[in-house]
Amino acid sequence: MLLLNGDAAATFLGFELVRLHAMLNDLPAALLIVAVAFEALHVFTKREGFRYASFWTLMAGAIGAAVAVLSGLQAEASIEHGTAIHELMERHETLAFITLGVFAVLAGWRLLRERKMGMLERRVALIVALVGAGVLYTTGKLGGEMVFQHAAGISTDVMEHEIQNRGAGHEHEGAEAGVAPAAMPDSTVDAPAAEPDTVSDHVDPPGAPPHTH
């Protein structure tokens, strides 16, 4: 069994927590957005099927969002980061709590009032959901900036190795790498004339008119 020292174990744990947080983010965000879309469809069409779909996707999304926030808090404490990432991380964390709060309140509201809501109350709930979706979008955008613009969750050693690897460059096969194709024979150069046969084994049939070869 491979044993890791303290620093290596902490780095490995940090990587795993970041991956876990990234994995747990997508599904709750998708569920919450879909829940808002279904609720909007219900408000405008009055179809009960959209209301049921919105209710259950909201419940699942709110629970998943709580798990995603907890995993993010664990990842934050275990990854290497500088000042730029720290500032983004603080904003990301604050918006994540706001997002979770909005949808948790909305889920509790609908859990208690789902069958008693009038259309006015449901429209107000939809407005709250739309606000939550906007905050959710901004939260995800900041998370993407941390990863793709500041390499959050990537260790310094890995980044240094990747910088060296990119600096060395690489080659693609064939024309994609800009390699000139092999020189082709020049079709404009006349081929050398064939030497006339010095000996001919051709025999004319009897009665053929005189001619030269």
Image (spheres, rainbow, N blue to C red):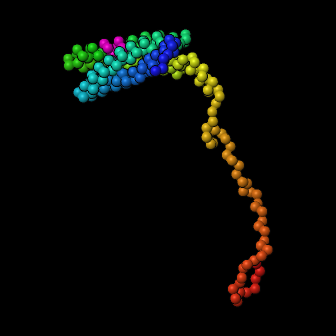
**Pick the front one: 129 or 195:** 195
Residue 57: image location, x then y, percent: 30, 23
Where is residue 142 shown, x and y percent of the image? Answer: 48, 17
Please give the name of the residue rendered at 20% of the width and 19% of the height, measured from the top-left corner: 115
Residue depicted at x 64% and y 30%: 169
Q: Give the image quarter of residue 196.
A: bottom right
Check the image and name the residue furthest to the bottom: 207
Residue at figure coordinates x 70%, y 88% from the top left: 206
Q: Residue at x 40, y 15 (%)?
A: 71
Residue 201 position within the rendered picture, expressed as x and y whole percent measured from the top left: 73, 78
Residue 189 at x, y = what percent? 76, 57
Please give the count of numbered marks on the rendered protein. Answer: 0
Which residue is nearer to you in this view: 118 or 205?
Answer: 205
Along the horizontal axis of the image, is 162 left or right of 58? right
Residue 101 within the magenta-colored segment of the rendering: yes
Q: In the displayed image of the protein, which residue is found farthest to the front? A: 1
Task: Determine which quarter of the picture holds residue 42.
Answer: top left
Magenta stretch holds residue 59: no
Query: Hey, which quadrant is residue 102 in on the image?
Result: top left
Is residue 60 visible from the viewing direction of this image? Answer: yes
Q: Could one spot residue 43 in this view of the protein?
A: no
Q: Quadrant of the C terminus?
A: bottom right
Of residues 13 and 188, the one nearer the viewer is 13
Which secondary structure dominates the residues rendered in magenta? helix
Q: Indicate whether 68 appears above or below 50.
A: above
Q: Is residue 89 above or below residue 186?
A: above
Query: On the rendered structure, is 1 left or right of 102?
Result: right
Q: Which residues are magenta?
A: 100-105
Above or below, 82 against 2 in this view is above
Nearer-the-camera pick, 4 or 31: 4
